[in-house]
Image (tube, rainbow, N blue to C red):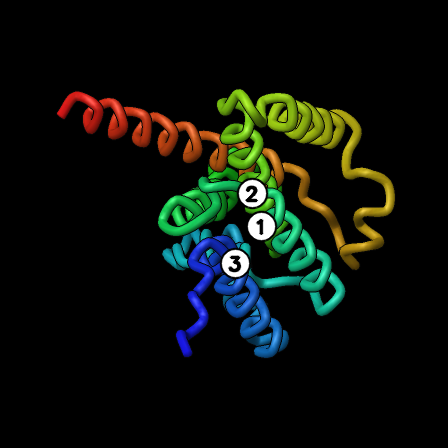
């Protein structure tokens, strides 16, 4: 009797969500002390606590905020493609999270503190939209996702958070983080797509 074949595609797709979920849940279980020690906090970062640029994305306001963002992580994983798997997914996620932290630090000095994965999720969505948009068979889907994401970001920058989002999260919504995350995720996606195409072209010439 042969052993069941491991579904490597499923592992690749859900590895990143699993890591994000485990990290965020662990911080939430640490309570207020972990939240305060790891959240993005401008004055602390300027004092040398650079890890907060990354860890702030994994801390949350509380269980309701955490669950809301983890549902978003699952949805992004379900929608995403190759760019959100393996080392590509890890790179996009890392770039998105660092983009949120550094974006808030450099471009949003009025934001004194921030927690949550929503900014990074916007980066992952931007990457998924870009990947789908450059493939002929999924171009319409990618363009639709990209247009919806762009419209949401534009609304937030002009009119503030979408109605009821602050209520759902249980606290203030920092829309600047969404913009910074989306930009960083898109840039990471572009870099990966260019890398993959160059590699494919080189292999074709061999």
Q: Nearer the viewer, residue 197 or 189?
A: 197
Q: Nearer the viewer, residue 129 or 49?
A: 129
What is the distance, in whole Å, between disc 1 and disc 2 at their CAs? Answer: 5 Å
The quadrant of the rendering that contains the N terminus is: bottom left
What is the distance, in whole Å, between disc 1 and disc 3 at their CAs? Answer: 7 Å
Q: Nearer the viewer, residue 185 or 45?
A: 185
Residue 153 vertical placement versus 19 (above, below): above
Residue 44 appearing in the image: no
User: What residue sits right under mark 1 in the picture?
Assistant: 77
User: Horizontal and vertical percent for residue 193?
Assistant: 38, 29
Image-based side of 28 in relation to 158, left or right? left
User: What residue sits right under mark 3 in the picture?
Assistant: 14
SS assignment at label 2 = loop
User: Horizontal and vertical percent for residue 125?
Assistant: 59, 38
Name which residue lies at 52% across and 61% down.
Answer: 20
Q: Residues within 10 Å of mark 3 (few under 14, many from 20)?
A: some
User: Horizontal and vertical percent for residue 83?
Assistant: 45, 40
User: What residue sits right under mark 2 in the picture?
Assistant: 80
Residue at the far left: name it: 206
What is the distance, in whole Å, between disc 2 and disc 3 at their CAs? Answer: 10 Å
Name which residue lies at 37% across and 56% down.
Answer: 48
């Amino acid at each position: 009797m042969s052993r069941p074949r491991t579904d490597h595609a499923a592992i690749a797709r859900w590895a990143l969500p699993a890591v994000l979920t485990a990290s965020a849940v662990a911080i939430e279980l640490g309570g207020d002390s972990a939240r305060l020690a790891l959240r993005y906090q401008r004055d602390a970062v300027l004092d040398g606590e650079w890890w907060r640029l990354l860890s702030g994305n994994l801390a949350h306001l509380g269980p309701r905020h955490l669950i809301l963002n983890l549902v978003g992580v699952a949805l992004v994983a379900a929608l995403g493609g190759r760019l959100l798997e393996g080392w590509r997914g890890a790179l996009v996620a890392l770039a998105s999270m660092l983009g949120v932290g550094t974006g808030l630090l450099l471009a949003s000095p009025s934001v004194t503190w921030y927690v949550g994965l929503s900014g990074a999720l916007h980066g992952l969505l931007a990457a998924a939209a870009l990947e789908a948009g450059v493939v002929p068979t999924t171009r319409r889907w990618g363009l639709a996702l990209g247009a919806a994401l762009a419209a949401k970001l534009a609304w937030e920058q002009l009119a503030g958070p979408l109605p009821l989002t602050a209520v759902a999260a249980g606290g203030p919504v920092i829309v600047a983080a969404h913009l910074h995350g989306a930009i960083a995720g898109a840039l990471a996606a572009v870099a990966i797509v260019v890398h993959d195409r160059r590699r494919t072209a080189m292999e074709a010439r061999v």
